Amino acid sequence: MRSGRLRALEGISPVLAVCFGVIAGSVLIAAMGKNPVAVYGTMFRFCLGRADSIGAILFKTTPLVFSGLAVAVGQKAGILNIGIEGQYFIGSFLAALAGFGLKGLPGLIHLPLAIAAGMTGGLMWAAVPAYLKIRRGVHEVISTIMMNYIAFSLVHYMVADVFMDKAQMPIPGLGSPRVRTPLMPDSAMMPKLHGFLEMIGISLPKHTYVNWFLPLGLALVALMYFIIWRTSFGYEVRAVGQNARASEAAGIKPGAVTVRVFLLSGAIAGLVGLSDLLCYFGYLDIDFPKGYGFNGVAVALLGRGSPVGIVLASLLFAFLDRGAEGVQTFAGIPMETMVILQGVMILSILVFAEISSRYVRQVQRREAVRG
C-alpha cells in the first residue's frame, strides 16, 4: 500500500469509526423496537435546528476541549493521565475560593486570578503522581485514579463543612439550603460570547451559556500544537514519548521532561471545570458536573491527539449529549437507555479507531521491512 493511501486511511479512520458507532447504535435502537432512522433524524433536528441547542453544544464542547487537550499533551510524552477528573475538581475549588474570597477587585484582575488559581490547583494535584512516578516508580494510572477519589472527598469536605455558605437564603419549596460555597461577584465571572457573536451576525438565545472559555480553549489547542511540533521542548517531549531510553542516549533527560509535561497537563486540566463554574453556576456545590475527565480520555483517543481531532471529537461528544436530551423528549426513549446508547456508540468508535490504528501501524512496519 502506498504511503499516500496509508495516510488517507489513517486520516479517515476516525470518520469510519463514527460510522461504525452509528451502526452499532442503530442495532441497539432497533432492538428497542424503534426506527433508527427516525431516532437519528430527531437527534439531528433537535441539535441543529434550534439556536439554543447549538449554544448548548458549544457550551458542552468547551470543557471537553480542555480535557481532551490535557490528556493528549500527556500522551505525547507517553503519560496516561487518568487524573484529569480530580485535577479539575481541585482546580475548580481553588478558582471558587479565589472567586468568592477576593473582594473589591476589578474584573480585569479578579477573573484572571480565578483562572490562574484553577490552573494552579490542577498543576498541584498533578505534581503528586508525577513525583511518585519519577521517584518511586508508581504507575500514573494507579496513582491518578487514587488521587481522583481523594480529590472528590476533599472538595466535598471543603464545600460541605468548611466553606459552605451558611448565610444563604433557602430556595422556596426546599427545606434546607444548598450545600455550596458563597456566590462569586460578577468581577470573577467569565462574560458570554453573545455580544461578539451578534457583531458577526450570529444570534443565540440569552439562556445559553457559550462564553469566552471556548475561544480560549481553541487558542490553547493551537498553542500546544505549536509547542509540541515547533519547539525544542516539543521535540524532547515527542522523543521521550516514542522511546525514553533512546531519548536519554541523545542527551535528553526523560524524568525532567515527564515531570514538566505532567504539570502542564495538570494545569490545563485545572481549566476543565471553569466554564461551568465561572459562567453558569457562580458557585461550587457538591453536585458540580463530573465525568469531563474520563470523557477527555475518549476525546483524546478519538481525536488521535491532533488539534483538529480534539476539537471535532469534543463537538461530537457534546452533540451526542445534547441529542440524548432531544431523543428522550421527542422520541420517547428513556434517558437511561440513551446513556447506554451513548456508551455503546463511544465504545464502538474507540474500538474501531484502535483497530484501524493498529492496522495502519502494521502496514507501516511491513513497508519499513520491505524498504
Image (tube, rainbow, N blue to C red):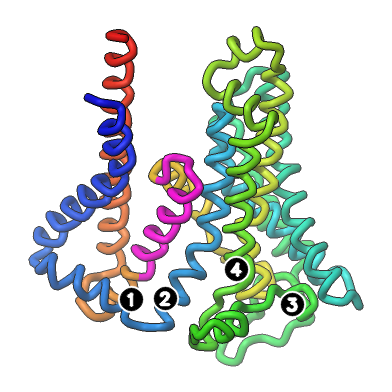
Disc 1 crowd, CA 10 A, few/some/many (<14, 14-19, 20+): some
Q: Secondary structure at mark 4?
A: helix
**In percent of the image, x 59 and y 36: which residue is there?**
229
Pointer 1 residue: 48
Q: Which residue is mark 2?
A: 54
Decide whether residue 316 is among the magenta residues. yes
Q: Main secondary structure of the magenta part?
A: helix
In the image, residue 106 lies at what x, y percent?
87, 77
Mark seen at residue 183: 3
Distance Cα–Cα, label 3 vs label 1: 34 Å
Work out whether mark 1 precedes mark 2 in sequence or the reverse, and give the earlier one: 1
Q: Going 69% across and 26% down the picture, which residue do you hit? A: 257
Q: Earlier in the sequence, mark 3 or mark 1?
A: 1
Rounded to the nearest angstrom, the CA distance separating label 4 from label 1 is: 22 Å
Q: Is residue 145 visible?
A: no
Amino acid type for the residue under numbered disc 2: Ile
Residue 72: x %, y % from top left: 53, 40
Q: Position of residue 217 (x, y in %)?
A: 60, 58
State the residue at coordinates (27%, 14%): 366
Tell me the magenta residue range: 303-322
Separation of disc 3 and disc 2 at Cα?
28 Å
Mark with earlier residue (3, 2): 2
Residue occupied by mark 4: 276
**Distance Cα–Cα, label 4 vs label 2:** 17 Å
Q: Is residue 154 above or below residue 72?
A: below
For this rendering, which residue is in front, 45 or 169?
A: 45
Residue 204 numbered mark, or none: none
Which of label 3 and label 4 is nearer to you?
Answer: 4
1 and 2 marks in contact (CB < 8 Å)? yes
Q: Among all residues in the image, which is located at the extreme bottom?
A: 172
Which residue type carries mark 4? Answer: Asp
* Frontmost residue, 3 versus 146: 3
